[in-house]
Image (cartoon, grey):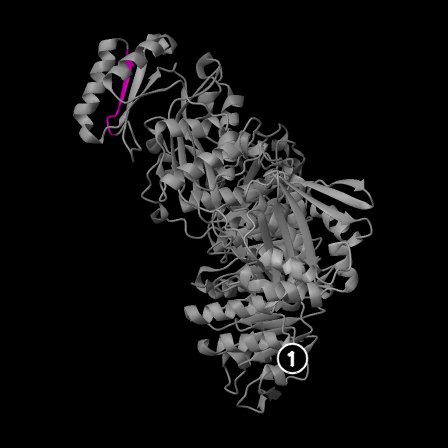
Amino acid sequence: MPSLPYPLPSAEALIADGSTVGIRQIGSSDRAAVLDLHANRMSAESRRLRFFGASRRAPELAAERLCGQDRPGLLGLGAWSGDELVGEADSEVLDDPATAELALAVADEWQHRGVATLLLEHLVHAARARGVRVFEADTLAGNRAVHRVFADLGLPVHRRLEQGEIRVRVPLDENDEHYREAVDERGRHADVASLGPLLRPAAVAVVGASRRPGSVGQTVLRKIRQGGFAGSVWAVNPSAGEVAGEPAFPSVSALPAVPDLAVLALPAAAVAGVAEECGRAGVRALVVLTSGLGPDDAVRLMRACRRYSMRMVGPNSLGIAQTDPAVRLDAEFGGAFPLPGTAGVAVQSGGVGIALLKRLAWLGIGVSGFVSLGDKYDVSGNDLLQWWEEDGRTDLALLHLESFGSPRAFARTARRVTRKLPVLTVDAGRSPAGRRGAASHTAAAATPTVTREALFRQAGITAARSIDELVGTAALLHAQPLPAPRGAVAVVSNAGGVGILAADACTDAGLVLPELAPGLVESLPDGASARNPVDTTAAVGPAEMARCLKALERDRAVDALLVCLVPTALATTGDRDPVRALLDGPARHGVPDVAVLLDQQVPVRYLTCADGGLLPAYSDTVAAARALVHARDRARWLAEPFAAEADVPGCDPDAARSMVGAHLAAHPDGGWLYPVATADLLDCYGLPLITSVWAPDEGTAAAAAEGLRGLGHRGEVAMKAYWPGQVHKSAAGAVRTGLATDTDARTAFRRFGEQFGGRLSGAVVQPMAAPGVELLVGVVQDRVFGPLVVLGMGGTAADVLADRSARLAPLTEHDLTTMVTELRGAPLLSGPSGEPPVDLAAVRDVLARVSRLAADLPQLAEADLNPLIARPDGAVRVDARVRLEPRPSFDPYLRRLRRPAAAREG
């Protein structure tokens, strides 16, 4: 088998029925397995369809071809279940280096389970990395199964009948959106299928259930029984005949039937061995409550889960609970059985989970399911979002995630799920201590907070700053309609000072307070103010308050009502309490209604209205305003049309990859590109710099200045000193501008030599660009989140201004627009003081091209285009810096189960 430019990594992935298979390159040591697959695990009919005949030597020839002497153009991948090869797919480049012949073989008992399709997806990824752009295959007309595989793959398929055989041609377009959607859809179905034994088990075993009252295992066993679990539950304890009145069995293999789910409450050293026993017995899911696993035990545990197709929650989990009446599983040791309802809850921290469940229960918001993810070796928030999307019960998702194992997969899932139900999370870890000692302006901007915020914004996730804010926002979204995307709020209070506080809170949150329609004063007591915020005075009664609220609800300028009430002697006398105006009417109107009751002792609660509906009441104006702005942001997200990835014509990714490969071959550790190489790489993506000439000496610099002066603003040129590793030229005093004569140019170069000595490699000479608005466009590759594209106000003050907008690549057409409008300096681009606006289309084009550059080249560690001078006649790229690092190609759409750092081998 030929070697690849870099090692082809092995991976585990889910197939259609939720089972796990391993995908890895076939090598010479796999000869016996390949022969066994073709000779013993495929029927005579399957071999006929694969080899176009019944030759007895076909299996041996296949094994020799795949595992014998190196064939330079051959690449074979195998699908493994444990030590068993269950399928293989191979491609071989023959004459045309861009075209490869394709072949597939799957064991009979594994057919129609998605093995062939999964193998093809991984082979497509590997072939693209080798420069293959087309697969071709000869098939028999009667081989319906393989034709179905091709048809369902998601790539275009061209067929041609030739002498009873069908020649199939499959172009491997890297940017085929239909293929990506098909891969995602297959992954979603496989993921949901794999979670069934975990979240809808028919039988559960608690392994490690102790006779000691109050122990974790016994507590979980009792709660499963007391919770009314609909299936069978067994205790496993080799030292006890019974636990808590239940018969105990010495081992999982001794149980009367195979459980779908095993809950492990064991010493850390015993977990991996018991997990292997569970896998051999046929268990399909684990919840590991144990904490403190060492590295070797973590590796063994994960290896068992993958080998035996078990999904796992934990370790260090509080447990799980499912309130579906058909399941009623309470396998956790945190507290009371969660109130049944429609909110899906997933947390990494057990303590946060207990607190969150208690607050939701106090509010009356029930949960459809609760999962304490713990150390999150396997099952993650991404898995649960896909489950809740399909379970038919969940209409609100609440997440507390401290880390993201596969943020790009999470973002794609969340972007789809948030169209159907609100997804709320707590944005934990916003400390500026996460800021890196960065080498470029873009890297300095790409803090962990900025990256997470970009992820949440693009996926439509509502990110709260605290558990209180999360619960307060959930209370509003659970009970009230969304406001219009405009987010115009009318504030009503019976005390002027409170109304002003509420108005300030709304403004600080980013909401607007509109002018109100005339005529409102007719429904108010004497002395009331009908301006926004509306002051009804303390004398207002429920009837007058109700008329006021109805008038505001009919006002087309109002998208939401914030009603602030304080107890007064007048208000609490007899029937004069204005709160009755809220209680006696319906809970839901055309706009969301939110109350603030300053004498309330809890952060948020529900008021039950006359129609039985719920009205959220907060104890603080800031909390109410934050909930409203989150609802406004969700309304805006839903109002946005689906935006496709930005189209970027005229790019040459193959040439760019060739350049990157050549540079890293010469510089294995990577580093900053020289100016000429930087310009060449940017040219591949239609990002040419302003005309530049490299000058290694004074004479060349003077000649370049003479030749370029006619192109420069006012007939002047600029000169920039360069040496390897240089980043911030201006800060180092390495820039000279306004050079108008030959003497100026020679003097500038000579002074660079005096200033920088032996470090100086040369200088770049450019014509002076005409003035405009200086911007920064850059990208930084985050090893977890992927490429983050940054737009900001640029120039030498870029870091001081810190006016930036960021998105994860690839950017959509909508991202290109909103990134510009989000800048505080956006008015400068629109032409202040009667000046013409800059060419925003040119700015958006630069953003799109930088996004595509970063998405195509994972080796692009960071890049700065600073300044990008935006003018009415276009956008001029004056300077750029690019840093490369050796990294393998990464396809975020390739299906594979993630490997947590704590459980990685080696």
Q: Is residue 218 visible?
A: yes
Q: Is residue 822 above or below residue 62?
A: above
Q: Residues within 10 Å of mark 1 (few under 14, many from 20)?
A: some
Identify the residue at image location x=46%, y=41%: 501
Q: Is residue 203 above or below residue 807?
A: below
Residue 337 location (% of width, % of height):
60, 71
Residue 710 location (% of width, % of height):
36, 7
Element type at marker 1? strand
Q: Is 709 in front, or is 354?
A: 709
Residue 369 location (% of width, % of height):
62, 63
Prevalent SS, magenta region: strand
**Does residue 419 appear left or right of residue 349 in this picture?**
right
- Label 1: which residue? 233
Tell which residue pokes out farthest to the left in this image.
754
Q: Amino acid at mark 1?
A: Val
Identify the residue at image location x=62%, y=85%: 254
Identify the residue at image location x=73%, y=51%: 149
Q: Is residue 11 above or below residue 332?
A: above
Residue 738 forms part of the magenta stretch: yes
Q: Tag count in the figure?
A: 1
- Range shown magenta: 732-739
Residue 40 location (% of width, % of height):
70, 68
